[in-house]
Amino acid sequence: MKVLVPVKRVLDYNVKARVKPDQSGVDLSNVKMSMNPFDEIAVEEAVRLQEGGTATETIAVSIGPAKAQETIRTALAMGMDRGVHVTTDEDLEPLAVAKILKSVAEAEGAELILMGKQAIDNDYGATGGMLAALLDWPIGQYANTVSPGEGSVEVKREIDGGLQTVNLKLPAVVTTDLRLNEPRYASLPNIMKAKRKPIEAKTPDDFGVDTTPRLTVVKVTEPKAREAGIKVDDVATLVDKLKNEAGVL
Amino acid sequence: MATLVVAEHNNASLADATAKTVTAAKALGGDIDILVAGKGAAAAAEAAGRIDGVRAVIHIEHDLLDKQMPEAMEATLVALMDGYDALMAPDTTTHKAYMPRVAAKLDTQQISSVTGIEDGTFERPIYAGNAVAYVTSDDPKKVVTVRTTAFAAAGEGGSASVETKATEIGDMGSEFVSEELTKSDRPELTGAKIVISGGRGMGSGENFSMIESIADKLGAAVGASRAAVDAGYVPNDYQVGQTGKAVAPELYIAVGISGAIQHLAGMKDSKVIAAINKDEEAPIFQVADYGLVADLFKALPELEAELEKVGY
C-alpha cells in the first residue's frame, strides 16, 4: 500500500520560543528549524512499514516555504521514497492544510496517512482529524502501536485512562504519539542518496484551495511568569509551610 | 447565541471536566445545552442537568456511542449543530480525537485548548506554553476545545430538562477492539486536589512506591514527567506536560523532576507548587513556591513521617 506522511518544518524543540516585541507572533528569524518531532515518528513508522514489506511506496509531503524542502529531504534521508512540496509563505491554518492534503492523498492514491498528532508550534492538534473527516476515512489518534492487517490496520491508542485498541478499515489516517517508535538518524550515505530522490513542486492554487485564514491573531504574548518562591531547609519546615502558610494540607 | 457543550463521561458517571467546560461556555455568552452521547448514560445525563446555567440536556443513546469513537461522534454532532453557534468540549483525548472532524465538516477552523475567553477573544497557549496567542474567529460556527484546568467548575443547582434524541450513524470504518485502563483507587490525575509526581530522579519504577505511599496518605493522584514515562518507570497515562495531561491542583509536589519546559506547561497553573530536587539549579525551583534541595531518597521517607505527625 501507498503511505503518505505529511511533515512540517517547525522551530526546533530544543529552542525556546521567543515572542516578537511587537506581539505579532514568535520570532523565527535566525533560529534552528527542524521536522516536527511527531512527524518524525510518522516518517520512521512509514519506513518501518516499507522495510517490513507492508508499504509499497512512501511519500513525504510538506506545505510551507522554500526551506520546507529541507524537511522533505530529511524524510527522504530517513528512507522515504519521494516528496511533494506545496510551496507557500503563509502560515496556513489546519483547515487549509487538511484541504490541500486531501487533494494530495487523492492524487497519490494513498491508502494510509501517518502523521503527527500535533505540530509543536501552534499546538492545534487538528490537522489529522480534519483530513480524515474531509476524506471520510476512519482515524486512529495518538498511536502507540500500528499493526497493519489485510485491508485494515489495528491501532493501539494512548488515551487518558490507559490504552485503547481500535481496528480501522483502510484507507485510514493514523496520528502518532511519542512512544510509537524512536526515529532513526539518517546515515551520511542515505543523506547523499536523498539528494537524488524526486520532489514534486506544487502550490495551494494547484489544488484550488482557498487558504484565507479564519482566525485573526490579535496578539501573541509571553506567558504569565510564575514567581519563584522560597527554599526551605528541611522536610519538617516544608510540611509546616504547606499546612500553616499555604493552607493546602 | 447558543452553545452546545459535549459532556465528558464514562456512561456511568459525569466527569468534572463537563462543569468546567460549561464555565468556559458561559464566558462566550448565550444559552448552553449539554450533549451526553453514550450507551447506558442516563445517570450522566441527569447529572448534567443539575449543572448551574444549563438550558437543556440532549441525551443520545447508541451502541456505537459506547466508546464515543470519533466517527460516531462526528455523525452525531454534525447533525445537531444546525441549532447552535458554537460547539465546546474539554480537551481530553476522547474529545480531541473527534472535534477536528466536526470542525472540518462544518468548514470551521477549530480553536484548540482554550485557557480564557473574553469579549469573543480566545486565549490559547502555543509553543508548549512558551507563548500565548489571543485569537478571534470569523467562522459562523465556532468549534472550541477547552483546557479545563483553566476554568473553575460551574456549580450545581440547575434543573435542566433532559431531552432524548436519536442519531443515525452509518458505516464508521472503525471498530473498538479492547481497552487496558490503568486501575487505581487514587483520584483521577486531572481532577485531584493534590498531585505528587516523580521524575527521572526516582531512578526506577519500584522507587515510585515511595511516592504512591505518600499519595495514599494524602488522597493524592500520582503523576510523572515525560522522562520518567520514557524510562519505563510508570505507564504513559501518568504523564504531566504539554504532550501529556495538564493539571492544576491545589498542591503539586514535584519529586526528582528537573522542570523541563514541556513539564512546566502541564502543571504551572497549580495553586501551590512544592519541589524536592537535589540539584539546586533545577528549573523547577523557578516556579516552585516551596523548594527543598535534598536527596529524594532521604526526603521522601521523612515527608511520609512528617505527614503522619500532622495527622495523615
Image: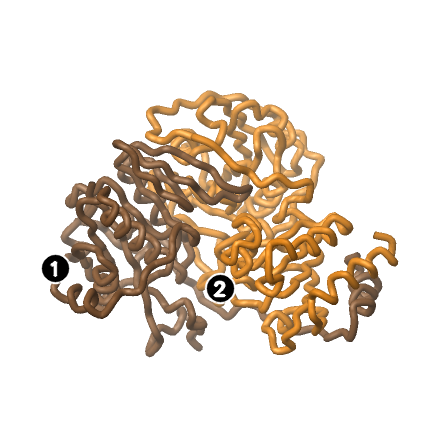
Q: The residue under label 2 is which amino acid type?
A: Val
The disc at residue B132 is 2
Measured in 3D between alpha carbons, the distance from the residue under mark 2 to the one under mark 1, in whole angstroms, is 39 Å
Is residue B53 rendered to the left or right of residue A87? right
Q: Residue at x 44, y 42 (%)?
A: A157
Q: Chain A: give its colour.
A: brown
**Between B241 and B248, the one nearer to me in the picture:** B241
* Label 2 crowd (10 A; few <14 / some 14-19 / many >=20): many
User: What x and y, as percent, mark residue B188?
Assistant: 64, 44
User: What x and y, as percent, mark residue A169?
Assistant: 30, 32
Vertical placement of residue B270 versus B61, above or below: below
Residue corresponding to mark 1 = A198
Question: Where, by quadrant of the figure, is residue A36 drawn?
Answer: bottom left
**Between B258 and B171, the one nearer to me in the picture:** B258
Vertical placement of residue A25 versus A83, above or below: below
Q: Which chain is orange?
A: B
Q: Quadrant of the C terminus of chain A?
A: bottom right
Vertical placement of residue B217 versus A193, above or below: above
User: What x and y, as percent, mark residue A97?
Assistant: 28, 52
